[in-house]
Amino acid sequence: MKFTAKEDIGAPIEAVFAALTDFDSFEKMGLRRGVQARRTDPWGGTGVGTSWLLDFSYRGKPRQIQAELTSFTRPTGMVSNSDSRVGSGRMEVRLLELAPNRTRVQVDLEVTPRTLPAKLLVQSLRLARGRVNDRYETRVGLFLRDIEARLVRA
């Protein structure tokens, strides 16, 4: 199942890309929400091969996801693949410069279930596709507007 969200940000493309690749701040943000993120790549940089092991609780059960950047093209986007026991995912972030101080960000998320319970969950999401995609767009929009606000203040 695929979700898509688009948002225009009032900031230069380089600044938006830098904010979207500030992985240290994402790790701290995750900690506040109960997600333990551990870097697993040996070199500790930012680019293709950067990877994390994410531990969190969802619906009362401990979950674990392995995520890795598989494409990293400054300043136009990146792709990350994730893998867990119940399924896999692919997130693609694309940036397009609309004007010197205007950038369009598109975030596509594709989820592929592996287990029967995960397949049932995805099927129920398909039935509520419009509402689920609206929630996804809202969440991504709030996140990107927060980045825009931080960039404007800086």
Image: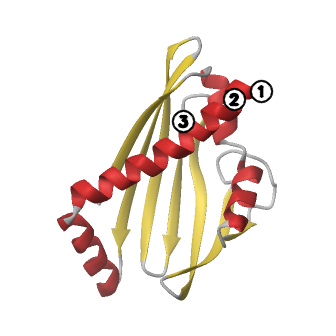
Q: Is residue 110 visible?
A: yes
Query: What percent of the width, then of the height, locates residue 80?
Result: 54, 53
Select label 3 or label 1 by which is in front: 1
Q: Which residue is mark 2?
A: 151
Q: Is residue 15 left or right of residue 120?
A: right
The kind of residue tagged 3 is Gly
Quadrant of the rendering where the C terminus is positioned: top right
Sequence-earlier tag: 3 or 2:
3
Q: Are marks 3 and 2 in contact (CB under 8 Å)?
A: no
Residue 65, quarter of picture: bottom right
Q: Is residue 38 above or below residue 104?
A: below
Distance between the alpha carbons at the discs numbered 2 and 1? 5 Å
- Near mark 3 (Cα within 10 A), the count class, few <14, some 14-19 or many ≥20, is some
> In front: 141, or 41?
141
User: Whole-percent x and y of residue 97?
Assistant: 51, 19
Above or below, 136 relative to 65: above
Q: Which residue is mark 1?
A: 154
Q: Is residue 109 depicted above or below 107 in this figure? A: below
Q: Are marks 3 and 1 in contact (CB under 8 Å)?
A: no
Badges 2 and 1: C-beta atoms under 8 Å apart?
Answer: yes
Q: Given this view, does label 3 or label 2 mark the residue nearer the observer?
A: 2
Q: Secondary structure at mark 1?
A: loop
- Label at residue 77: 3
Task: Kindly identify the residue that appears in the image at 22 percent across and 64 percent down.
Answer: 128
Horizontal side of 63 relative to 141 (left or right) equals: right
Question: Which scheme is used to colour this image of the protein?
Answer: secondary structure
CA gap between label 3 and label 2 equals 18 Å
Which quarter of the picture shows residue 52? bottom right
Residue 60 position, x and y percent, is 52, 88
Q: Residues within 10 Å of mark 2 (few under 14, many from 20)?
A: some
